[in-house]
Image: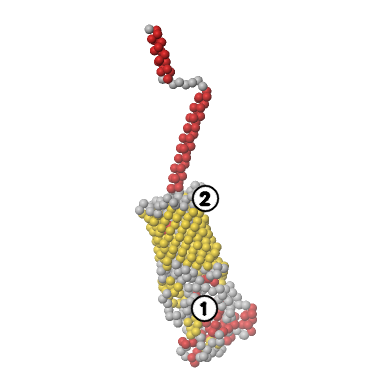
Amino acid sequence: MKRSFLIFFIFLLPTFILSKDYVPNDDLYFEKRDIKKHIKNKVKTELTNKLIEKINQDYERHLFYKIPSWPIESIFFLKKDLISARFDGLWATQAYGSSGGTKDISKVIFGSDTIRLKDIVLASRLIEEGKLALSAGMSNKYNFLTILKDQIFDFDASIDRQEVALSYVRNFEKSDVSLGLDVPIVRRSHELKLVSNISTVDRNTLIASASEFDASYPNGLSDLFAEILSKKKIGFNQHDDEVGIGDVKVFANLELNSKSCERCFLGVKAVFPTSKRRDIYKLWDPELGNGGFFEFAAFGSVLFSKSKLFNPHLFAEFTYFTSGDASRRVPKIVSSDDIEDPILAQIRFDEDFMIYGNSVKWVSDTATFTGPDSNVARFADASKKIRIHKGPELLFRIGNIITNVFSEKGFIDFFYDIKAKGKDYVGFQPSNRDYDISGLTKNSYEIRHRVGFDFNRWLDETWRASFGGRYVFAGRNTLRAFELAASIGFEF
């Protein structure tokens, strides 16, 4: 019996030992166990924190997304509606001419670097050519037509323009399609000052000829210039302001979903000439729009998201202008063939034939002449309605966004753009025999190189604001302008 119990105990002892939690009494074991537990908790905490950080980043990127410096027609938003107000200001005292050099704005506006008396007064030019002469008894009063024929009229011109545009955009079809309306209110101011003076030589010549110039024109050249424009029925305001509604535009865009970029858009735009037309009875009237033409444009834009410092974007837009009838000053061709009474013309003309016609006479019926009443279109004696075809326009912009500027809700965008516009041409027109249209489209093509920046910041989940600046640093037939821009938007 005892022997059987011993054998049973020997067999059960291992089973009893293995059924218990056997813990060796060893300090090394406990240290290893604590290290493993610590590593496990640390890895779990780090993975959890990274996951939470990624979720927060995705949330903020979705909520406080990047907004490139694109026109309003290409701006995107996530909610159903967007209302925005934009301010743009422009100031310029210089322009880039057709050769690319810097000059006064007036030389680009008038299409001529040098404007002389004989360029805008036909009688003076024909006296120089020997076709006309001063009538009897007119030499003392009107001899300035001869003495001052090469007198240059120089101007100091400047422009400042402010625009407040109100926009409403609505998303459709799960925010992939947007339709919008943009209404600008524009203030434009022009300053044009005559800065020329009569030279000492010409002044002495006038005095020596017993001229009545000083008595007729107490303020000298400025009074003469005002009289010339008055005879042409052209107003001359040294400072001229206009305020009104600009050209209203409507637009539509479609967002294309792509894994290779953050945003991609295609769209179309139409601009309606709702602004005031040019006043042809002013020498340089401030225009609040594009001159009275319909615009149709197609555009595309793409934004890439790479890192905090590198988020490039592109924008391109092609604009086509429809032809339109516009009133313009058009130089009239004056010819000796139009003289109805040659005998009377050898005594004097009348003012309807040419300005200062009552002070000059035709030398003889063999001294034929044909030419425009002005070599500078804006100084023409008459105005006509003509059909103008504006040249197409291409705008291309490239930029880069830097995120997390001053805060996680702020970012700054630096960009460069180039605009190229084709030359205008005249379609249906008055008879080429009666009018000189060659100068109407002079300097109408344009190339503009511009750099700029915008700082954008989200104020909260629905409000966003921006401000920035632009500078035109090179070009052809364009303003050397400095611009400021600001905007605020609310999406809901």
- Residue for point 48% across, 74% down: 440
Residue 489 vs 204, above or below: the answer is above
How crowded pointer 1 is (Cα within 10 Å; few <14, some 14-19, many 20+) is rated as many
Q: Which mark is residue 375?
A: 1
- Looking at the image, the residue that sits furthest to the bottom is 343
Is 298 situated left or right of 196 in this image?
left
- Residue for point 50% across, 56% down: 399
Among the 4 quarters of the image, the one containing residue 55 = top left
Among the 4 quarters of the image, the one containing residue 300 = bottom left
How many marks do you count on the picture? 2
- Residue for point 42% across, 77% down: 429
Name the residue type under label 1: Asn
Among the 4 quarters of the image, the one containing residue 136 = bottom right
Percent x, y of residue 320: 42, 66
Residue 273 seen in render: no
Name the residue type under label 2: Leu
From the viewer's side, name the closer residue of 395 and 202: 395
Residue 132 vs 177, above or below: the answer is below
From the viewer's side, name the closer residue of 476 and 411: 476
Percent x, y of residue 402: 51, 51
Q: Secondary structure at mark 2?
A: loop
Is 354 situated left or right of 19 in this image?
right
Residue 111 seen in render: yes
Labels 1, 2: front one: 2
From the viewer's side, name the closer residue of 44 and 178: 44
Query: Which residue carries the number 2 mark?
Result: 309
Q: Secondary structure at mark 1?
A: loop
Give the position of the N terminus as an image quadrant. Answer: top left
Tell me which numbered mark, 1 or 2, is placed earlier along the sequence.
2
- Residue for point 54% across, 90% down: 363
